[in-house]
């Protein structure tokens, strides 16, 4: 990698002059010819200036999940690790708070926050009273006030259904989880289920008896739900299932394998997230790859736009995904 010393040597100017030109020092009085010569040599040598980021302090990382929820879904653990890693590269000093700490533990001196998890109306009101510099990842609970970055689950769900239909499937089921409403404690339908119902209805293929959901996104939940589907439907089991998340899908595969139901010859499975284990289960899962690195990077960039760039306009980013086709579909 080329250095300022290399550019100085080849251009014939001093290290000090080259450094000040490349750092756009407006107080330096040199001719346009000198600047152009230095830029020309820098480009020829493929010089890349190191970006030194200003330290950003007092950024809260609100990790609003329990240890059990993280254990059951490696998607969130991967996200937490990625945020912590990227924060260092962005020179952001994170102050981590968990749901067990409670919203009142977050000091009013924070400059902004990154949030993962489900927040109640009371908690959101508390955050609005502290700062406008907030970014939610994976959900968008307050889109009129805070930024958010999340995978486009609507398009993922529709793509999964379209894929199955193109393969000739008409009996398509859904297996997923529900979320507890943080205000009422009651279960709420996940976005993937809502889109599945509306899009299947639009296609004239919706059958309520093919939909199985229960609170949580764990392997155990998937195992129980698929066993319930097998027991209730028997020979009328759909030929394809769209599954809300990889851990649930792993449990579904276990149940199908135990019952000697052939995958994909009898039942095809498409899931979401592309966690590492999906390559090694039997059979390997067809799943949508969600780029957690890109989600987290965009979230931190949005935060810096608000905290440092003083952007006022609220942004909501929906990121696309790639269908990774493996042996659980044909």
Image (tube, rainbow, N blue to C red):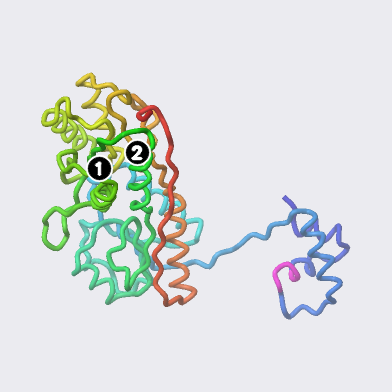
Q: Is residue 168 left or right of residue 207?
A: right
Disc 1 designates what residue? 205
Q: Calculate the distance from the C-alpha at mark 1 to the C-alpha at mark 2.
A: 10 Å
The structure residue drawn at horizontal position 13% and vertical position 32%, both measured from the top left corner, is 228
For the residues labelled 1 and 2, say whether their Cβ atoms are less than 8 Å apart: yes
The structure residue drawn at horizontal position 37% and vertical position 53%, both measured from the top left corner, is 152
In the rendering, at what x and y percent does residue 139 appear?
31, 58
Please, what is the dominant secondary structure of the magenta stretch?
helix
Q: Is residue 21 magenta?
A: yes
Q: Which circle's residue, 1 or 2, is located before the other in the chain?
A: 2
Disc assigned to residue 165: 2
Q: Is residue 183 left or right of residue 173?
A: left
Compare residues 240 and 217 and report the one nearer the observer: 240
In the rendering, at what x and y percent does residue 178 appear?
19, 49
Q: Is residue 227 magenta?
A: no
In the rendering, at what x and y percent does residue 224 appear?
16, 33
Instruction: Name which quarter of the figure residue 47 lies in.
Output: bottom right
Dot 2: few (<14), some (14–19), or many (≥20) neighbours within 10 Å? some
Numbered disc total: 2
Q: Which residues make up the magenta segment?
A: 20-24
Q: Residue farthest to the right? A: 12
Question: Which element is circle 1 on?
Answer: loop
- On screen, 196 above or below 144? above
The structure residue drawn at horizontal position 19% and vertical position 30%, both measured from the top left corner, is 237
């Amino acid at each position: 990698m080329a250095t300022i010393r290399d550019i100085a040597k080849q251009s014939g100017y001093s290290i000090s002059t080259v450094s000040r030109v490349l750092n756009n020092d407006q107080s330096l009085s040199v001719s346009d010819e000198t600047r152009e010569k230095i830029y020309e040599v820098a480009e020829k040598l493929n010089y890349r200036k190191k970006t030194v980021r200003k330290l950003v302090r007092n950024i809260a990382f609100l990790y609003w999940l329990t240890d059990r929820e993280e254990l059951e879904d490696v998607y969130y653990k991967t996200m937490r690790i990625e945020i912590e890693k990227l924060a260092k590269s962005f020179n952001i000093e994170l102050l981590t708070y968990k749901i067990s700490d409670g919203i009142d533990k977050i000091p009013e001196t924070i400059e902004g926050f990154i949030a993962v998890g489900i927040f109640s109306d009371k908690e959101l009101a508390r955050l609005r009273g502290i700062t406008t510099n907030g970014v939610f990842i994976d959900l968008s609970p307050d889109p009129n006030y805070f930024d958010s970055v999340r995978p486009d689950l609507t398009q993922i769900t529709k793509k999964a259904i379209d894929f199955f239909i193109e393969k000739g499937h008409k009996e398509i089921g859904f297996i997923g989880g529900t979320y507890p409403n943080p205000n009422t404690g009651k279960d709420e339908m996940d976005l993937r289920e809502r889109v599945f119902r509306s899009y299947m209805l639009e296609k004239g293929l919706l059958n309520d008896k093919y939909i199985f959901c229960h609170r949580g996104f764990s392997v155990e939940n998937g195992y129980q739900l698929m066993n319930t589907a097998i027991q209730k439907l028997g020979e009328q089991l759909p030929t394809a299932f769209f599954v809300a998340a990889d851990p649930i899908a792993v449990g579904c595969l276990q149940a199908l394998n135990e019952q000697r139901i052939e995958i994909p010859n009898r039942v095809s499975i498409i899931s979401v997230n592309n966690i590492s284990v999906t390559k090694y289960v039997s059979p390997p899962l067809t799943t949508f790859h969600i780029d957690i690195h890109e989600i987290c990077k965009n979230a931190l960039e949005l935060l810096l736009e608000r905290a440092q760039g003083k952007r006022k306009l609220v942004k909501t980013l929906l990121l696309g995904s790639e269908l990774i086709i493996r042996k659980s579909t044909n």
